[in-house]
C-alpha cells in the first residue's frame, strides 16, 4: 500500500507534441482516484508513466515515497488492468493469474492460496482451468483483475478496463471493481473517458483536458462546484446548459438577461459574489436537472419562463426537452407525466440556487 | 374482391419479379472452382505420378519405348533396393538431414530474437534495419555464390558439407526474420506490457509469451527454412564435389547420371524418397502453417 505523487510531470513526444504539461497530483494511500477526460487529454499517458510503460520527459513520479522515474515496471510493485484484458492466450486462467508470482519465484502453495483467494473475491473459481478464448468479455475482465489482485501490489492501475464491455456488463463490473477496492483497499488509479464511471467509482476525480489537470475533487464537489467551463460541461449527463447572458444591476438586485427577452433574477445571497461582474457578458450555466417543469414549491429563487420545445426525448423515468435560444441549445429535464409537445408553449422553472456564471473569456466559473 | 378471386381459383399474381438466383450463382461458382482445381491437380500431380510409375519399372521396361509411360507392367522395388543398399544415396540423405536440421536450428536461433527485437524493442533505425533484412533476401543467390566461394575457400570449407550450414542461413534468416516481424507485430502490445508489469524481463517475455503465442508463425518460418535448405541446389552444386559430402539434390544427379547414361528408375526412386521428409513436415504442421500465413488478416 502506498501513496503516489506526481510532481511537475511532463511528457513530450517526437515533434514537440506535449501530451502531459507539468501536472501535480498527490494520491493518498488506499485512495481510489479516477483520471477522466476526453480522448487525447493525457490521462492514459499519465497512467502509463506511473506504470513505467512510458518514459518521463520531465518531473517526478514517486510511489510509496520512492522516486520511480528510472525504475522498470517490474520493480515498481504495481499491477495494471488493460482495456483489452491482455490475458496470455496460451495460458489457463490459473496460469494467467499466477504468472507474475511464478516469475517472482513464490512458493507453489502460496501461489495456489493467493489465486484461490482472488478467484473467490471475483467469483471465478470454476474458470481456473479454462483458456481465455473460452471466457466471455466480463469473465476475461475479472481474470485480468484477478491477475492484479494476486500480486498484492502497492498500486492498481486501470486503463479504461470497462470500455470493451456492453452497457449492462459495464454497470455490473463497475460495482465489482468498487467492491474489490473496498475489500483489498489498494491505492488505485483508474483512467476512463466515461464521467459516470468516474463519478460512481472515485474517492476523488481528476478532470484532465489538453494535458493539464482542470480540477481535482470528490465527485459531488466537481458536480456542484466546478471551477471551469470544461469541468462544468464534462461532469454531468446530459451536459450543463451554457446560455450567453448579460449580468445587469438594477434596483439593488442582479438580473440575468438571456436571449429572447428572458430575464432571470440572481439569488440575493449571490449578489455580493457576482456584483463586481455587473454589466458584463457572461455564460449562464444551469444543469438540465435544475431546469424542470413548473411545480408548487416553497423553495426560494425559482424563476419561471416560457419556451417552445423543439425536440422531446421521453426516457421513461424522465423526459428531456430541447429548445434553442438564439442558436444555443438548451435542455430541460421534466417529469415524464408532464404533457410536453413540440411547438406548444411550456413553462419551465429554473432553480437559480444551482446557477453558475462563467467568464466567457477565461472560461472560469465566477 | 379477394373472395371472388379465391372462388375462381385463379392463381394470385406475383407480388414482385424474381431477379437472379443466389443458388444458381453459387452452383456456377462451385463448377468454376472445381474446374480450376482439377486443372491444378492434374498439372501438379502428374509429374510425381510419372515418377512413381517410373521408379517401379525395371531398367528394361523403362528402355522399352513401345510401352505406355503411364503404366507399369511388372512393378518392382529393385530401384529402391539398389538405391538404399548400393551407392551413396543413404550418405546423401544423412547429409541432407544434418545440413537441414542445423540450418533450421541456426535460422530459428537468429531469426526469433531478431524479429522480436525489430518488432517490439523500439530503437533508433529499427524500421530501416527491418527493411534492410528483407532486402538482403532479394539478392539472388546466383550473384552471391561467387563471393561466397572465396569466403568458404578462405575458411577452408570448400567441399565440406558444414559450409552449407553456414551458407544456407543467408537465404533463410532474412525471410524468416521478415515473416516473424509481421507475426510478432500482430500480437497486441498490451500483452508484452502486461508481462513487463508482471515482472518479466525481455528474455522471459520472448520465451514465455511471444514464442508460445506466435507458434503458428514460427512453425511457418520453420517449414520455409526446412524447404529451402532441403531443396537447395545451387550452393551444394558449387561448393561440394566429392560424393561423401554431397546432399540429396546434387548427389542424385551426380551419382545416378554417368555421362549420357541416366539411371531413370533410381533417379525417380531417389527423388520420390527425397520428397518424403518435406511431405511429412507439411502434413504434421500444415494447420499451423495456414494459421501462420493468415495471421493478422482479420481482427478476431
Image (cartoon, coloured by chain):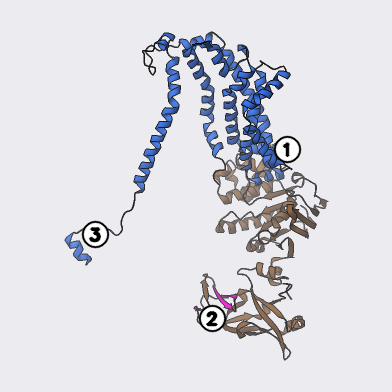
Chain colours: A brown, B blue
- Identify the subunit bearing mark 1: A
Name the mark nearer the viewer: 1 or 2.
2
Q: Is residue B22 above or below residue A34?
A: above
Could you tell whether A66 is left or right of A263 in the image? right
Whole-percent x, y for residue A324 in the image: 57, 77
Could you tell whether A67 is left or right of B268 in the image? right
The question of residue A262 being in magenta is answered with no
**Mark 3 Cα-neighbour bin, 10 Å: few <14, some 14–19, many ≥20:** few
Nearest to the observer: residue B248 or residue A271: B248
> Do tag 3 and tag 1 residues touch (Cβ < 8 Å)?
no
- Identify the subunit bearing mark 3: B
What element does badge 3 sit on? loop
Q: Is residue A272 above or below residue A41?
A: below
Q: Which residue is mark 2?
A: A308
Q: Residue at x 58, y 35 (%)?
A: B216
Q: Which residues are magenta?
A: A316-345
* Residue furthest out toward the bottom: A251
**Mark 1 Cα-neighbour bin, 10 Å: few <14, some 14–19, many ≥20:** few
Give how far apart the Cα atoms at labels 3 and 1 are: 80 Å
Give how far apart the Cα atoms at labels 1 and 2 are: 70 Å
What element does badge 1 sit on? loop
Q: Which residue is mark 3?
A: B12
Quarter holding residue B181 = top right
Q: Is residue B56 above or below residue A232?
A: above
Whole-percent x, y for residue A295 in the image: 57, 82
Residue B190 numbered mark, or none:
none
Amino acid at each position: 500500500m502506498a501513496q503516489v505523487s506526481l510532481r511537475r510531470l511532463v511528457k513530450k513526444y517526437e515533434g514537440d507534441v506535449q501530451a502531459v504539461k507539468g501536472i501535480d497530483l498527490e494520491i493518498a494511500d488506499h485512495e481510489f482516484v479516477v483520471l477522466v477526460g476526453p480522448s487525447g487529454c493525457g490521462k492514459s499517458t499519465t497512467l502509463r508513466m506511473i506504470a513505467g510503460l512510458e518514459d518521463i520527459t520531465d518531473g517526478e513520479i514517486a510511489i510509496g515515497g520512492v522516486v520511480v522515474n528510472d525504475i522498470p515496471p517490474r520493480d515498481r510493485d504495481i499491477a495494471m488492468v488493460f482495456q483489452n484484458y491482455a490475458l496470455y492466450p496460451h495460458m489457463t486462467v490459473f496460469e494467467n493469474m499466477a504468472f507474475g508470482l511464478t516469475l517472482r519465484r513464490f512458493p507453489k502453495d502460496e501461489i495456489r492460496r493467493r489465486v484461490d483467494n482472488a478467484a473467490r473475491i471475483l467469483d471465478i473459481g470454476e474458470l481456473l482451468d479454462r483458456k481465455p478464448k473460452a471466457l466471455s468479455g466480463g469473465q476475461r475482465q475479472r481474470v485480468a483483475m484477478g491477475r492484479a489482485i494476486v500480486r498484492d501490489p502497492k498500486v492498481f492501475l486501470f486503463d479504461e478496463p470497462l470500455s470493451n464491455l456492453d452497457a449492462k456488463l459495464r454497470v455490473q463490473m463497475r460495482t465489482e471493481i468498487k467492491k474489490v477496492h473496498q475489500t483489498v483497499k489498494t491505492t488505485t488509479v483508474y483512467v476512463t473517458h466515461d464521467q459516470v464511471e468516474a463519478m460512481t467509482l472515485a474517492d476523488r476525480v481528476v478532470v484532465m483536458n489538453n494535458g493539464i489537470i482542470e480540477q481535482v475533487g470528490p465527485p459531488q464537489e466537481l458536480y456542484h462546484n466546478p471551477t471551469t467551463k470544461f469541468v462544468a460541461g464534462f461532469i454531468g449527463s446530459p451536459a450543463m446548459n451554457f446560455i450567453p447572458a448579460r449580468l445587469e444591476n438594477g434596483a439593488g438586485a442582479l438580473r440575468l438577461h438571456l436571449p429572447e427577452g428572458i430575464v432571470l433574477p440572481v439569488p440575493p445571497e449571490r449578489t455580493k459574489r457576482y456584483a463586481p461582474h455587473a454589466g458584463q457578458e457572461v455564460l449562464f450555466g444551469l444543469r438540465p436537472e435544475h431546469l424542470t417543469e413548473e411545480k408548487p414549491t416553497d423553495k426560494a429563487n425559482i424563476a419561471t419562463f416560457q419556451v417552445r420545445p423543439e425536440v422531446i426525448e421521453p426516457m421513461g423515468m424522465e423526459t428531456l426537452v430541447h429548445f434553442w435560444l438564439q442558436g444555443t441549445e438548451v435542455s430541460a429535464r421534466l417529469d415524464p407525466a408532464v404533457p410536453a409537445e413540440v411547438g406548444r408553449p411550456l413553462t419551465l422553472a429554473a432553480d437559480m440556487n444551482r446557477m453558475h456564471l462563467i467568464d466567457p473569456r477565461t472560461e472560469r466559473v465566477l | 374482391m379477394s373472395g371472388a378471386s379465391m372462388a375462381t381459383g385463379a392463381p394470385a399474381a406475383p407480388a414482385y419479379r424474381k431477379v437472379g438466383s443466389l443458388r444458381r450463382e453459387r452452383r456456377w461458382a462451385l463448377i468454376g472452382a472445381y474446374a480450376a482445381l482439377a486443372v491444378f491437380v492434374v498439372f501438379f500431380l502428374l509429374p510425381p505420378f510419372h515418377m512413381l510409375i517410373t521408379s517401379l519399372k525395371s531398367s528394361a521396361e523403362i528402355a522399352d519405348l513401345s510401352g505406355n509411360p503411364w503404366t507399369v507392367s511388372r512393378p518392382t522395388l529393385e530401384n529402391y533396393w539398389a538405391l538404399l543398399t548400393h551407392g551413396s544415396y543413404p550418405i546423401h540423405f544423412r547429409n541432407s538431414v544434418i545440413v537441414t536440421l542445423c540450418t533450421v536450428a541456426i535460422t530459428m536461433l537468429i531469426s526469433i530474437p531478431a524479429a522480436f527485437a525489430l518488432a517490439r524493442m523500439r530503437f533508433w533505425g529499427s524500421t530501416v534495419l527491418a527493411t534492410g533484412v528483407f532486402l538482403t533476401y532479394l539478392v539472388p543467390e546466383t550473384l552471391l555464390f561467387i563471393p561466397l566461394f572465396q569466403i568458404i575457400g578462405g575458411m577452408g570449407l570448400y567441399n565440406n558439407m558444414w559450409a552449407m550450414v553456414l551458407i544456407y542461413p543467408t537465404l533463410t534468416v532474412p525471410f524468416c526474420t521478415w515473416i516473424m516481424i509481421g507475426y510478432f507485430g500482430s500480437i497486441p502490445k498490451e500483452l508484452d506490457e502486461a508481462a513487463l508489469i508482471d515482472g518479466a524481463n525481455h528474455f522471459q517475455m520472448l520465451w514465455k509469451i511471444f514464442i508460445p503465442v506466435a507458434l503458428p508463425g514460427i512453425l511457418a518460418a520453420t517449414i520455409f527454412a526446412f524447404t529451402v535448405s532441403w531443396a537447395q541446389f545451387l550452393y551444394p552444386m558449387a561448393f561440394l564435389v566429392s560424393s561423401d559430402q554431397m546432399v540429396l539434390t546434387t548427389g542424385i544427379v551426380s551419382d545416378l547420371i554417368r555421362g549420357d547414361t541416366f539411371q531413370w528408375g533410381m533417379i525417380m526412386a531417389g527423388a520420390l524418397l527425397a520428397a518424403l521428409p518435406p511431405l511429412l513436415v507439411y502434413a504434421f504442421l500444415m494447420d499451423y502453417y495456414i494459421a501462420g500465413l493468415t495471421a493478422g488478416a482479420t481482427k478476431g
